[in-house]
Image (cartoon, rainbow, N blue to C red):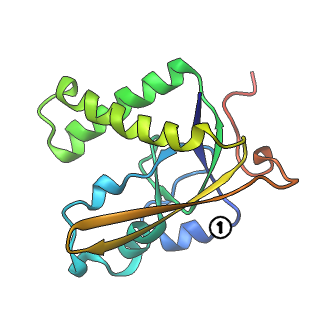
């Protein structure tokens, strides 16, 4: 099974996002954060997060780039639980049981996007706001000679 982790090609995320994600955090699109937004909110750092920020599932920060990598079933389940709790804490879901199917859908969407790509494939997101809501488009850049390990740490060194 595959998902994506945030990567840092440079320090620009520190300057463009209110809460930048650290390298190596699991991530999803996170477009749901902008579902009730209008043009008045699209200024400064929030605009940058809206325009092209992936949502980290550890710090709930944003990153410009993510890269495809393998994930274990237990890691995937833990992320589903964490995202469901985030929906309760930040978005008013009534309880974790109500939030779990939505969290699972978000992770499943990201997993399906990553599944057919080689490890280390870079993913980029672009969002626009129109009369029907938030529109997301995704771009993929196949891995080059540098591996993801050059940019992000994957798990424990133990």
Answer above or below: position of 63 versus 40.
above
Quadrant of the snapshot with the N terminus: top right
Which of 97/2 is in front?
2
Answer above or below: position of 1 versus 86.
above
Instruction: Name the residue located 69 percent from the left edge and 36 percent from the top edge.
Output: 154
Q: Secondary structure at mark 1?
A: loop
Instruction: Name the residue located 34 percent from the left edge and 65 percent from the top edge.
Output: 135
From the image, tell me which residue sits under label 1.
Answer: 11
Q: Residue furthest left?
A: 94
Corner quadrant of residue 57:
top left
Q: Residue furthest top?
A: 74
Give the image location of residue 9, x and y in percent: 70, 62
Instruction: Name the residue located 11 percent from the left edge and 33 percent from the top edge.
Output: 94
Give the image location of residue 27, x and y in percent: 50, 45
41 left or right of 65 in image? left
Give the image location of residue 105, x and y in percent: 34, 35
Give the image location of residue 22, x and y in percent: 57, 51
Q: Residue furthest front?
A: 116
Dot 1 alpha-carbon crowd within 10 angstroms: few under 14, some 14 to 19, many 20 or more: few
């Amino acid at each position: 099974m595959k998902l994506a982790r945030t990567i840092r090609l440079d320090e620009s995320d520190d300057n463009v996002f209110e809460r930048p994600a650290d390298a190596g955090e699991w991530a999803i699109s996170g477009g749901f954060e902008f579902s009730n937004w209008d043009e008045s909110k699209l200024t400064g750092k929030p605009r940058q997060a809206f325009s092209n920020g992936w949502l980290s599932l550890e710090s709930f920060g944003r990153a410009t780039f993510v890269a495809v990598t393998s994930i274990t079933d237990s890691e995937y389940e833990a992320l589903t639980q964490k995202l469901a709790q985030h929906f309760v804490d930040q978005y008013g879901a009534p309880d974790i049981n109500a939030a779990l199917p939505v969290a699972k859908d978000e992770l499943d969407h990201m997993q399906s996007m990553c599944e057919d790509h080689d490890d280390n494939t870079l993913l980029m997101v672009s969002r626009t706001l129109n009369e029907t809501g938030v529109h997301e488009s995704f771009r993929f850049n196949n891995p080059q000679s540098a591996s993801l390990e050059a940019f992000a740490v994957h798990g424990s060194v133990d």
